[in-house]
Amino acid sequence: MEDIRQTKSWKKYLQSSGWIVEEVGSINVFIKKIPLSPFSMMKIQRYSGELNLGDLKKLKRKYRVVYVVAEPIDKKVHGWKVNKHPFLPSKTIVIDLRKDEKKLWKDLSTNAKRILKKDSLVQTIELRGKKDRRKFYKNWKKAAHTWLMSEERFNKLIEAFGEDASLWVSKKGDSLLSGIILLKSGDTVNYFQTWTSEAGRRSGSHYHLVWQVILECKRQSVRWFDFEGILDERWPQKRWAGFSEFKKRFGGKVISYPGSFVKWFYGNKKALS
């Protein structure tokens, strides 16, 4: 599995949003100036293997970095402080799409199967083109109750990923009920952002949308479907409980990452170690 944060597309997206991107070996490192100061912060996300601390020292000096966040895939960063508020989800669910459709159905929860078995006029379609993109964002904004990326950043994200980004919606008649932004990286599709209207919640339309999208990804020979985050009891965020329970109803394997690790450089003089 290749995480989107280490892809060329993610690099292009962050560069378009004002981040500086450097490479330490094969690892993308993202740096951003701290407003109204001469200093910068750095984040290194979803990488495998060991960090080259010598090369990081050079970047620290070059950009006057005072704060670093590292969120590895496979190993803790020893000697760095654990961040109790990770930038990325520290736990997720991944579905193996090599299973046949009957096995994928069997893995669904009883509740998910009950909703999907109901007769429904809900359609699942992919939206294409700039007009449809605008329509997707407009409905997302209307449905959002929490954080929402700006339309400018949304457009930059879709443009950076190109054909590896797709917008899917459930609809009934002319009304859009729910939507998903999918981002592909290698053999993995990521359930990146999603929204559901009040009518969509009442009808259970998002179950239909997610199930149909999973089957479509399987038809396209994608290997993994990553739900991009669930509640992690190590660093719990209570507002994640509802959508985490929803994602669990589609089966899959729970994957836990080592966590988020931080390093401060007070006065920008302390050596990276």
Image: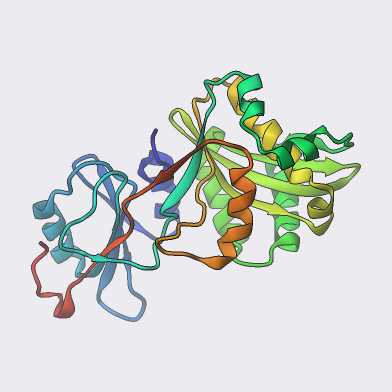
Which residue sits at x=75%, y=62%? 142
Q: Where, quadrant-wise, is the C terminus in this rendering? A: bottom left
**Residue nearest the viewer, comparing 251 with 195:** 251
Residue 101 horizontal side relative to residue 11, left or right: right
Residue 191 location, x and y as percent?
56, 43
Which residue sits at x=89%, y=34%? 119
**Residue nearest the viewer, comparing 82 with 40:** 82
Q: How many marks?
A: 0
**Residue nearest the viewer, comparing 110 with 135:** 110
Q: Is residue 103 above or below residue 22?
A: above
Colour scheme in use: rainbow
Q: Quadrant of residue 31?
A: bottom left
Residue 128 horizontal side relative to residue 254, left or right: right
Q: Where, quadrant-wise, is the N terminus in this rendering? A: top left
Residue 121 horizontal side relative to residue 193, left or right: right
Q: Is residue 31 above or below residue 123?
A: below
Q: Quadrant of residue 68?
A: bottom left
Residue 240 location, x and y as percent?
57, 60
